[in-house]
Image (cartoon, grey):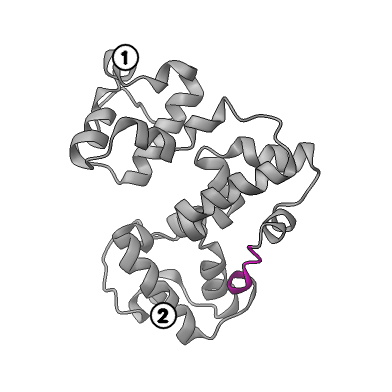
């Protein structure tokens, strides 16, 4: 469990800040919507990094975490859930294809309504929304996987070196094809793509 009240001593990745904020919201509830409350209760360091380091307004950050809908949007019709999910995909791209990513990034409410109220499997719901994830399901040639991974690294930089990050952010399909289909260790695959990294945490 991260001690969120203590400054980390360094600027965290934006995705890490989001994860920590969602953890704070889950623990303290609606009070955490207020940046004033955050600063008064030991979480000012997170606010400072969001606003000053990443130059993002607090409300924009809060909404990017999905918090603006967590306590408000309940018991939606299937058509409204489809509309909401399309907005999420438009904003977060491929990451939102992952049920795990959705649940960890403020959209647990949407996943729960799909599964519990409408009795639908996640892939079934995605297909209904027009996101069949053909690329995810089809086994690609190794050369194509390398091209896809280079695009991901270009967009997300060092974060994408971590296979854990890949699996949590909607790219587990690529990791599975590299590891299971082609039996290539993740570190070796990164090197094949031309990224000579020495980090010990990429596994």
Q: Position of residue 102 (x, y in %)?
A: 56, 46
Q: Position of residue 98 (x, y in %)?
A: 58, 54
Asked where in the image residue 47 lies, by quadrant, the reply is: top left
Identify whether 178 is placed above or below 78. below
Left or right of 124? Residue 68 is: left
Quadrant (top left/top right/bottom left/bottom right) for the C terminus: bottom left
Q: Are marks 1 and 2 in contact (CB under 8 Å)?
A: no
Left or right of 11? Residue 156 is: right
Q: How many C-alpha atoms fall within 10 Å of the one at disc 1: few (<14), some, or many (≥20)?
A: few
Left or right of 201? Residue 66 is: right
**Magenta segment includes 66:** no
- Say how many tags the image has: 2
Q: Residue at x 54, y 78 (%)?
A: 183
- Regarding residue 200, the answer to whether it shows in the image is no
Q: Secondary structure at mark 2?
A: helix
Mark 1 to mark 2: distance in Å? Answer: 46 Å
Which residue in the protein does label 2 denote?
A: 147
Q: N-terminal of the two: label 1 or label 2?
A: 1
Q: Residue at x 22, y 40 (%)?
A: 55
Q: Residue at x 57, y 42 (%)?
A: 103
Identify whether 124 is placed above or below 141. above
Quadrant (top left/top right/bottom left/bottom right) for the N terminus: top left
Asked where in the image residue 72 lies, by quadrant, the reply is: top right
Q: Secondary structure at mark 1?
A: loop
Which span of residues is magenta-colored? Answer: 131-136
Q: How many C-alpha atoms fall within 10 Å of the one at disc 2: few (<14), some, or many (≥20)?
A: few
Q: Residue at x 63, y 40 (%)?
A: 110
- Regarding residue 130, the answer to whether it shows in the image is yes
Q: Position of residue 8 (x, y in %)?
A: 25, 34
Which residue in the protein does label 1 denote?
A: 41
């Amino acid at each position: 469990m991260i001690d969120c009240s203590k400054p980390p001593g360094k600027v965290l990745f934006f995705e890490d800040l989001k994860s920590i904020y969602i953890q704070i919201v889950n623990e303290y509830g609606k009070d955490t919507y207020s940046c004033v409350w955050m600063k008064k209760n030991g979480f000012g360091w997170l606010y400072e990094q969001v606003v000053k380091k990443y130059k993002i307004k607090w409300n924009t950050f809060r909404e990017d975490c999905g918090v603006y809908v967590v306590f408000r949007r309940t018991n939606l019709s299937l058509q409204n859930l489809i509309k909401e999910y399309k907005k999420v995909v438009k904003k977060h791209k491929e990451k939102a294809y992952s049920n795990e990513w959705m649940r960890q990034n403020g959209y647990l409410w949407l996943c729960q309504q799909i599964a519990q109220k409408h009795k639908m499997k996640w892939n079934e719901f995605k297909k209904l929304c027009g996101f069949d994830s053909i690329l995810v399901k089809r086994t690609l040639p190794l050369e194509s996987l390398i091209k896809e991974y280079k695009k991901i690294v270009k967009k997300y930089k060092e974060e994408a070196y971590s296979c854990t990050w890949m699996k949590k952010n909607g790219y587990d399909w690529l990791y599975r094809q590299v590891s299971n289909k082609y039996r290539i260790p993740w570190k070796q695959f990164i090197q094949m793509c031309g990224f000579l990294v020495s980090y010990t945490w990429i596994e």
